[in-house]
Image: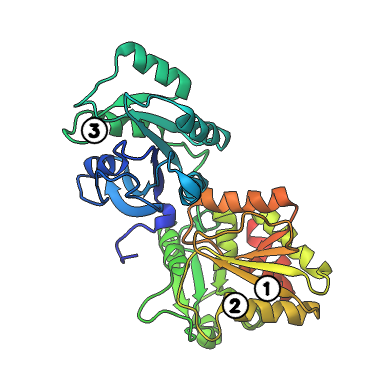
Amino acid sequence: MSLSGTPRGERWHIAIFGRRNVGKSSLINALTGQDVAIVSPVKGTTTDPVAKAMELPPLGPVVILDTPGLDDAGELGAQRVQRAHDVLHRADIAIMVTEVQFGFGEHEQALAVQARAKGIPLLLVINKADTAAPTLAARQSMATQARAPLVVVSAVTGEGMDELKLALIRILPEEESPRRLVGDLLRPADVVVLVVPLDKAAPKGRLILPQQQTIRDILEAGAQALVTRDTELPQTLARLNGRPRLVITDSQVFSQVAAVVPRDVWLTSFSILFARYKGDLTALVQGARAIDSLPDNARVLVAEGCTHQRQCDDIGTVKIPARLRQYTGKQLVFEHSAGMTYPRELRDYALVVHCGGCMLNRREMQWRLAQAREAGVPIVNYGVLLAHVSGILPRCLEPFQ
């Protein structure tokens, strides 16, 4: 992410679905006014979901998700179709592209049923109007079958593109209330101390995304953000004229920070803030309690939403397993997933440990939580877990009570 860019997890995710060669990639290029998708007359040019972050006036920052054809054939084709359907897990809006010769058939219907089941707004787009425009009766029939608004366009001539953008605006999901990362906990002029250790895993020359987003939300609340390393925290607190409203720390130094911060000062972590912001804090706290009853040889999945370069003391592959083994005294079996790869079957795991999810949008994070819930498997995130094994989880939840 650039310093001025909107994080991918904060953008509307618009997924484009349809059969091979109905013009999905061409539609993306026409919609965005950029050559962002490869266009070819050869069927199946898009073989894997492709995500493109961009600005799409008047919607603003979005991620466009191009997908393989829903009618792909063969064993490999079936895998591609499944990957296309999997994109629904992170889609805020689904655009179904078809053309007159295909109409709204079984492939379109199957995807539409899934979108409705997930509560994802659906827009039906009839492409290639420059070669074959649908009759009024055909339009009404397809819109009825899709149970969705319909727009007729031509990705070649640009016909209907303005209408398409207006239709997207009309179906954008409305949030019940604006979500805040930390701003709702603060008053104007409050002082918030952020503890940012600069260890081997810290990126060179910049703060990581959760830290950047937290600072921005503090400033938007009219409060003051003071950033320090864990090694300088005692001096930082001593120099303040009064006590801070809140201390937010990297979860990996919870114990050291908790020992320094006065008991009457709120304390939490970046990861716990994200547990509330994108996930379900109550469910993740319940997941932490399951740690105490893990048996020997229990399988634990450690899942991360990004594919960062792992260091020798990586939190997911080294620190979390070590802390869990130390805390439980059990021989645990750890498995790992990263990025958009997430196991379909979770029932064989005794616990899922997830990162804060800063690179995932909220819909994807909610889906992962739902998968664990349906499998009957407790799930916890890094920050909640580390607070629990450090014996300070109740204290770290006080700001939200």
Quarter assignment of residue 256: bottom right
Residue 259 higher or lower than 24, as above or below:
below
Report helix, strand or loop for mark 2. Answer: helix
N-term mark: 3 or 1: 3
* Front label number (3 vs 1): 1
Cβ–Cβ under 8 Å for marks 3 and 1: no
* Number of numbered markers: 3
Residue position marked by numbered label 3 in the rendering: 161
Camera sees residue 40: yes
Q: Is residue 16 left or right of residue 106?
A: left
Q: Label 3 crowding class (10 Å Cα cut-off): few <14, some 14-19, many 20+?
A: some
Q: Is residue 342 left or right of residue 32?
A: right
Q: Are marks 2 and 3 in contact (CB under 8 Å)?
A: no
Residue visible at 64% across and 76% down?
320
Q: CA distance from mark 2 to mark 1?
A: 8 Å
For disc 2, the marked residue is: 317
> Quick check: can you spot residue 179?
no
Relative to 211, does residue 47 appear above or below in the rendering? above
Q: Nearer the viewer, residue 53 or 61?
A: 53
Contact between marks 2 and 1 (CB within 8 A): the answer is yes
Within 10 angstroms of label 1, few (less than 14), some, or many (20 or more) residues?
A: some
Label for residue 3?
Answer: none
**On the rendered image, what quadrant is the C terminus found in?**
bottom right
Q: Residue placed at 81% from the left, 81% from the top?
A: 329
Closer to the camera, 332 or 110? 110
Q: CA distance from mark 2 to mark 3?
A: 47 Å
* Amino acid type, label 3: Met
Q: Position of residue 56 (x, y in %)?
A: 28, 45
Q: Which residue is mark 1?
A: 334
Q: Is residue 75 above or below residue 154?
A: below
**SS of the residue at dot 3?**
helix
- Residue that protrudes farthest toward the front in the picture: 74
